[in-house]
Image (spheres, grey):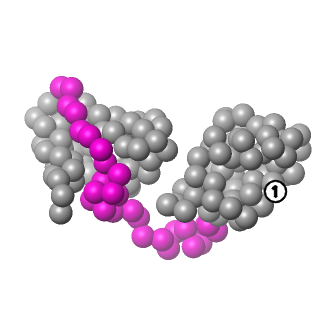
């Protein structure tokens, strides 16, 4: 399969209908007889400058992307955070499927000094704090996002 043809197909797909996950994209490409692995799609998504929005993947040019406001951690957490658990200096945040990366990216971009780093899966964000006390404070901060406004 030609990379340019696959990427052209990806762009046509995301412009014609909502595509919310890489699995949706794999299925849609497979229906067009275009094979693609998750690793290949991750590279294509990066190469094409696609971003994940509530409406699905969308293409944003680099100039427009730099002008977009960074997502606010509080706003995103209030919308998608389901649970917070602490394990020593680690926090485990649960989200609906396909939403963990959005929350982790917002945390990373916020540049909070209490966060040493994040790792995101499909529905789980792992936050590494420098120590247990800091993790407790962060956990309390995220727990407030779980409470009804």
Screen quadrant of the N terminus: top right
Residue located at (42% from left, 38% from top): 123
| Residue 36 picture location, percent across and down | 76, 37
Residue 67, magenta (yes or no): yes
Residue located at (37% from left, 43% from top): 95
| Residue 122 picture location, percent across and down | 47, 38
Residue 63 found in image quarter: bottom right
**143 left or right of 67 in image:** left
Q: Nearer the viewer, residue 114 or 79?
A: 79
Q: Secondary structure at mark 1?
A: helix
| Residue 94 picture location, percent across and down | 33, 39
User: Is residue 45 positioned above or below 33 on the image?
Assistant: below
Residue 54 in sight: yes
Q: Nearer the viewer, residue 64 or 99?
A: 99
Residue 130 in sight: no
Q: How many marks?
A: 1
Residue with the most extreme top position: 88
Q: Residues within 10 Å of mark 1 (few under 14, many from 20)?
A: few
| Residue 134 picture location, percent across and down | 15, 39
Residue 85, magenta (yes or no): yes
**2 left or right of 41 in image:** right
Screen quadrant of the C terminus: bottom left
**110 left or right of 88 in image:** right
Residue located at (42% from left, 70% from top): 69
Residue 11 found in image quarter: bottom right
Q: Which residues are magenta?
A: 60-89
Check disc 1 and report the residue beneath it: 8
User: Is residue 63 positioned above or below 5 on the image?
Assistant: below
């Amino acid at each position: 399969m030609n990379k340019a043809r696959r990427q052209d197909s990806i762009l046509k797909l995301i412009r014609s209908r909502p595509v919310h996950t890489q699995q949706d994209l794999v299925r849609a490409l497979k229906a067009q007889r275009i094979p693609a692995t998750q690793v290949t799609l991750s590279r294509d998504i990066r190469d094409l400058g696609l971003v994940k929005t509530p409406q699905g993947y969308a293409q944003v040019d680099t100039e427009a992307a730099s002008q977009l406001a960074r997502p606010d951690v509080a706003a995103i957490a209030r919308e998608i955070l389901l649970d917070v658990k602490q394990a020593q200096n680690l926090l485990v945040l649960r989200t609906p499927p396909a939403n963990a990366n959005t929350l982790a990216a917002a945390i990373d971009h916020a540049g909070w000094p209490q966060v040493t780093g994040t790792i995101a899966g499909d529905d789980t964000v792992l936050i590494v704090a420098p120590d247990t006390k800091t993790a407790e404070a962060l956990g309390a901060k995220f727990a407030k996002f779980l409470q009804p406004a």
